[in-house]
Image (cartoon, rainbow, N blue to C red):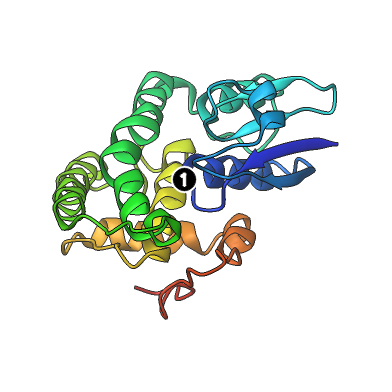
């Protein structure tokens, strides 16, 4: 059986869980401490980041972008890598994995979630304001990318849309999601969030950190 080592509010972990569900790949979940992974996990992935997929043949596939390529090679349906747009899909996946996560999601998680469990730790209003400002910039860019398409890459659902949805569920959970009046982005999130593959991640709950009251709402 495949094993996925993850953290509940890690957007990269959520993205891979969604992909595995979409492709109907059986796997068991193993949660790790985001800031202090276990020694056993560090043997699998010395970098300590998430997620890591331990395959049924006991191979460790490390990081969401590498896991995507691994799953691509298995040729499992449905197809989320549109051949004529492969380069753009990979570019935007890297954007979500690095820029969006590190400039928006991780800072907000550290200040609004992780610091709750650190002794004598107070959230930084400066870091939160900066992350919110970064979110506005990224959403503006996403709105530019989507244009009149149904999805990010023309009118076909791709990995990019699923990573977008996975990332926004994290912001949604901690009540930091805003669309800045970008109707296309709001509608796309509602469509993506309604997919059956999102059902299990939306059921996740972090001990001591409950989602805001509208978290399960699908119509924005």
The spot of residue 56 in percent (x, y) is 84, 28
Q: Determine the residue positioned at 56% across, 53% down.
A: 8
List the single residue furthest toward the front: 120
The quarter of the image holding the C terminus is bottom left
- Residue ID for mark 1: 11
Q: Is residue 106 above or below residue 218?
A: above
Q: Quadrant of the N terminus?
A: top right
Q: Give the left or right position of residue 153, taking residue 14 as reference.
A: left
Q: Measuring from the top left, give residue 13's x and y in whole percent.
A: 55, 42
Residue located 27% across and 46% down the image: 104
Question: As displayed, is residue 52 above or below residue 217?
Answer: above
User: Does residue 65 sit above or below 179 in this rendering?
Assistant: above
Side (left or right) of 46 relative to 108: right
Quarter of image, res 50: top right
- Residue 75, by quadrant, is top right
Q: Nearer the viewer, residue 21 or 52?
A: 52
Residue at screen point 57% across, 58% down? 198
């Amino acid at each position: 059986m495949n094993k996925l080592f993850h953290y509940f509010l890690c957007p990269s972990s959520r993205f891979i869980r969604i992909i595995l569900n979409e492709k109907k790949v059986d796997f068991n979940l193993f949660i790790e401490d985001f800031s202090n992974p276990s020694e056993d996990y560090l043997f699998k992935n010395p970098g300590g980041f998430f997620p890591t997929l331990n395959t049924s043949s006991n191979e460790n596939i490390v990081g969401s972008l590498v896991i995507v390529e691994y799953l691509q090679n298995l040729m499992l349906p449905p197809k989320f890598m549109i051949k004529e747009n492969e380069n753009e899909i990979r570019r935007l996946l890297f954007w979500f994995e690095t820029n969006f996560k590190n400039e928006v999601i991780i800072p907000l998680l550290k200040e609004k979630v992780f610091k709750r469990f650190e002794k004598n730790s107070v959230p930084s209003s400066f870091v939160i304001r900066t992350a919110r400002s970064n979110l506005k910039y990224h959403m503006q860019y996403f709105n530019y990318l989507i244009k009149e398409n149904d999805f990010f890459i023309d009118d076909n659902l791709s990995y990019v849309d699923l990573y977008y949805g996975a990332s926004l569920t994290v912001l949604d959970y901690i009540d930091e999601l805003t669309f800045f009046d970008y109707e296309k982005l709001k509608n796309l999130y509602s469509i993506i969030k309604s997919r059956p593959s999102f059902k299990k991640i939306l059921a996740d709950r972090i001990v001591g950190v409950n989602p805001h009251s509208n978290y399960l709402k699908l119509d924005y």
